[in-house]
Amino acid sequence: MCGIVGFVDWSRDLTLQKDILVGMTQTLTPRGPDAEGYWLSPRAALGHRRLVVVDPQGGQQPMIRQQGEHAFTLIYNGELYNTPELRHELLSRGYHFEGHSDTEALLLSYIEWGPSCVEHFNGIFAFAIWDSREQQLFVARDRLGVKPLFYYEQKGSLVFASEIKALLKHPNISPNIGREGLAEVFLLGPARTPGVGVFEGISDLKPGHVLFYSANGLHIRRYWALPNNVHTDDLKTTTAKVRELFVDSVERQLVSDVPLGTLLSGGLDSSAITAIAANRLAKEGKGPLQTFSVDYTDNDQYFKTNDFQPSADGPFIERMSNVFGTKQTNCTLKIPDLVEALKASTLARDLPGMADIDSSLLLFSREIKKHVTVGLSGECADEIFGGYPWFRRKEALESQTFPWTLTVGNRLQILSPELTELLRPHDYLQGRYEEALAEMPLLPSSSSVIHKDSRTLTGDQQREARIREISYLTITRFMPTLLDRKDRMTMSAGLEVRVPFCDHRLVEYAWNIPWEMKYAEGREKWLLRSALTGLLPDDVLWRRKSPYPKTHNPIYLAAVRTWLGQILDDSTSPILPFINIPALRDLMKLSDTMPSGHPFFGQLMDLPQLFAYLIQVNYWFVENKINLV
């Protein structure tokens, strides 16, 4: 993986602006610690930081290829998993290759197919190509938004980058925040509305979209969406197809010229990836597979089961490692380090994030990087196959809001009256919710297309329609938060982590599978478990879902509460105008006695994480020197 930066300007000679390009690109050094490259022309300037994974010599960027009088210059962040097929097709069409990198395959694909090249790719990517023939910049982002891309347009110019921090390094872009940005941070955060970059004027290119920028201005086009198909396969065929697609996805993503491992929690998703990877490496004589797990100091002493976290991971990790003969590394994080890393994780994400859920992954990634450069992780299986509690809980099915924010009371009560009046929280949240549902494809039926708001639906059809809504919301609004987290935290450590469950073929197929198949016998992800039968030990295969581990040590709550108290006591803290300080202090006093298991966001962000999130917000304001506009 890598970091990309660039700008196009129709009013000035960009060959004179290398210092700006270099300064922006250097902010992305953690994403690409191995190499750098720059390309400047009068109209366009491109910068690249590289993390070497495949073809160290042949994959250098910016990459330039000529076709007659015209040059095509590429910068690219990502990985293509169907490079062999692309090479075969392009060779048959008369192209020649100078190396074996996916970068070259991508650039030649653009030369052959133009903007429609993205439809030929299986992978995760954000890339930009300056097309001298068209005098146009072409930018694309992968279908599910695994790789990030932000941009800023102003007065005949466009600036873009993998991360917001690189944009803010440009002299024409200031760290300004308006009403929308405040609403995103205080009401939706750590989630973010697709396309919204929080800072004024900054947007992110939505997943499955391409961008064109020329003298005629900016044009954005969607090239992919979840397909609206009637699922006609029977259960046996469906189960076999899910297994086939998933195994193929994992095996494709094992390609690497550098050491590789898996992130193993002992849960279904990471264990399935580990099993396939271990078997494949053993077959090729490349084992043992390296596996990595994370835990926290004294978590065995303080862990308590609840509906969101029904069992500890340790015994299942050991079971998987023994069965598949992996080289297991256990990373135990210390609570003071976890707290301190709230700062680094905020800087890595460029926004307030998932508190210690972020900071722990950042520290975990640093440990993994000591051993391997590439990892495979089980993110997104719950979104694709309906693993979260909100897919089946009555209150979520009957709610008219995002199902991962059903308990926002603690959050809203600590907002200052002035901020509440400005943001009108319920209106903003409801508007974003309805906006998301308006995008959703109509529900397919065996005989016709059913509108989700049809009054003629039967009870079963209404339930299916509602679960489909929740599935769409989860894939397009909740899943990006986890993908942002995974990308920023791992790449800040120079670690490339791949997510096989985000293979678009698997997502497309699973999207239209009826809920009765996914949730047969009343078990979350029953279909996926059934598809993996025989691959995993039964106790792992049928283990109840348990999410990414977090600390249960009361020292963590005490530490973030103390830190937050110091912020409230400091009259210069920038967060103070936005907070109802008496209400927050009352909440802090009660925090020792309040029960867990009622997160304000997702499954893991409970009261300690709310305090940590506010710490991150304040730190974000300070470090970015944010201006209110």
Image: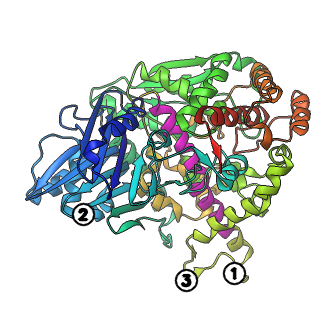
State the image coordinates of residue 475 (x, y, percent, origin top left): 57, 55
Give the SS element for disc 2. Answer: helix
Label 3, residues with CA under 10 Å away: few <14, some 14-19, many ≥20: few
- Mark 3 or 2: in front is 2
Label placed on residue 447: 3
Q: Are marks 3 and 2 in contact (CB under 8 Å)?
A: no
Q: Which residues are magenta?
A: 464-492
Residue pointed to by mark 2: 114
| Residue 266 visible in the current orientation | no
* Residue ID at (46%, 44%): 167
Q: Is residue 141 left or right of residue 465?
A: left
Mark seen at residue 454: 1
Label 1 residue SS: loop
Viewer-nearest residue: 598 or 78: 78
Q: What amino acid does circle 3 point to? A: Ser
Question: What's the CA distance linking mark 2 and mark 1?
Answer: 41 Å
